[in-house]
Amino acid sequence: MASNLMYLTALASLASQVFSQQQIITSPHTTPDQNSVTQWISGPDAFDGPKVIPINQTTFDWWYFDTVQEPNANGESGQPSFAITFHSTGPDGFDPLTGLFPFGSPPSDNLIQINLAWPDGKTDAWVLAGGEAIFTINGDGTSANYTGTGCSFEGAPDLSEYSVYIDAPEKGIVGSLRIKSDVPPHYPCGPAEEGQDMQITPGVGWLNAIPDGYGEADFLIRGNEEFYFEGRGYHDHNYGGRRFSESCASAYWGHGRLGEWNIVWLSVLTPTGEESVSAYVTKGSEMASTEIIVAQCEGIHIRPYGANSTYPPDTTTGAPTGFRMNINTPEGLFELQAERIYVTVDFDFYRRFTGTYTGTLNGEPLPEGVALWEQFSIGE
């Protein structure tokens, strides 16, 4: 028993050193049958660093950023939004991506997905394939350069701010996204502390560096179309130690703000029907005064409503009118509704939405706000 304990302690120490390295490089193509080490328990630092080293045929790691304009902000109509995902995934890792490529396998393990919605709801999308992805860890923050794409991101050591840069004029997009956090980071079931389980469901890890904050998108599209707005920003990080479809059959995720209340929600259904949930609720509009109300893997119920509200969703389910959710907290019962204005990404296996966020706390109305959310539906 003592020898086993010593072995496990040594292994944990080695893993901590691996995941706290200052620089990690992911090649554009994995080696077949390559072994990977996946981090499931949070360490003392490197909150946003790579969690799968190295990426192999069936593993994945991605960094996601978005911002959405609040309805009628600055007297403007419509609801522009912007989202970008930096993927490092083996050919069979985040396997839903294979449907986006005519020959099944992506041209590189390092991919970038970009989606934007104009104020009138029209959309643009890009998928860029990179060479090496070079990650530099600084404190809890991480910066990355996806070589050959013109795309990179930079994270502050204390996770207070992230900036994303795109310089791809040949693809028709140049500019930057800035997100300044107003809310503390968290893991699925608790605050950003050492020793937390980072799995939201068996085989998939999730950590939320910026649950809510000021967001500013400033881009030039196709050389002459200005795309600029200010809104609510967000950044999280997902990863997996096996094929995504082995862990997830469907999922609902989203984030929203109503006045001083920020909510992040997540519900994942496994292929065998087990549901995992996460609820994060904070109160306050500035980092210094924000209070975490709950960071828990219980006490939340999320379901679609309106058209196409079959549960659980599958690849034949269309875009629902929105989501309804109840969250039990020490402050009382939140009854919330995210109602879509636009569908910003529309695949059979994945949809993203933006819209209004309304609800009550203990029956008393909350200020109307804004939300961005998504639906995975991989099962048949």
Image (tube, grey):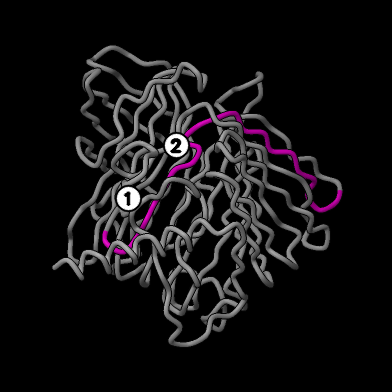
Compare marks 2 and 1 and give the one earlier in the sequence.
2
Q: Is residue 261 left or right of residue 276?
A: right
Nearer to me, 229 or 27: 27
Residue 65: horizontal and vertical position, in percent? Answer: 56, 46
Nearer to me, 273 or 131: 131
Which corner quadrant of the image does residue 101 belong to? bottom right
Disc 2 target residue: 185
Disc 1 target residue: 308
Which corner quadrant of the image does residue 315 belong to? bottom left
Q: Quadrant of the C terminus?
A: bottom left
Range covered by the magenta-colored residues: 202-223
Answer whether residue 98 is visible to the viewer in this image.
Answer: no
Q: Amino acid at mark 2?
A: Pro
Say whether residue 77 is magenta. no
Nearer to me, 23 or 111: 23
Residue 215: horizontal and vertical position, in percent? Answer: 62, 33
Q: Element type at marker 1?
A: loop
What residue do we see at 17% from left, 66% from top?
A: 2
Task: Assess disc 2: are there few (<14), some (14-19) or many (≥20) residues with their C-alpha within 10 Å of its C-alpha.
Answer: many
What residue do we see at 68% from left, 63% from top?
A: 146
User: Outermost residue, left direction?
Assistant: 1
Task: Assess disc 1: are there few (<14), some (14-19) or many (≥20) residues with their C-alpha within 10 Å of its C-alpha.
Answer: some
What residue do we see at 73% from left, 64% from top?
A: 149
Answer whether residue 346 is visible to the viewer in this image.
Answer: yes
144 over 359 or under it: above or below? below
Q: Is residue 244 left or right of residue 134?
A: left
Q: Main secondary structure of the magenta part?
A: strand
Q: Is residue 266 left or right of residue 114?
A: left
Residue 69: horizontal and vertical position, in percent? Answer: 59, 31
Q: Amino acid at mark 1?
A: Asn
User: Outermost residue, bottom direction?
Assistant: 32
Q: Element type at marker 2?
A: loop
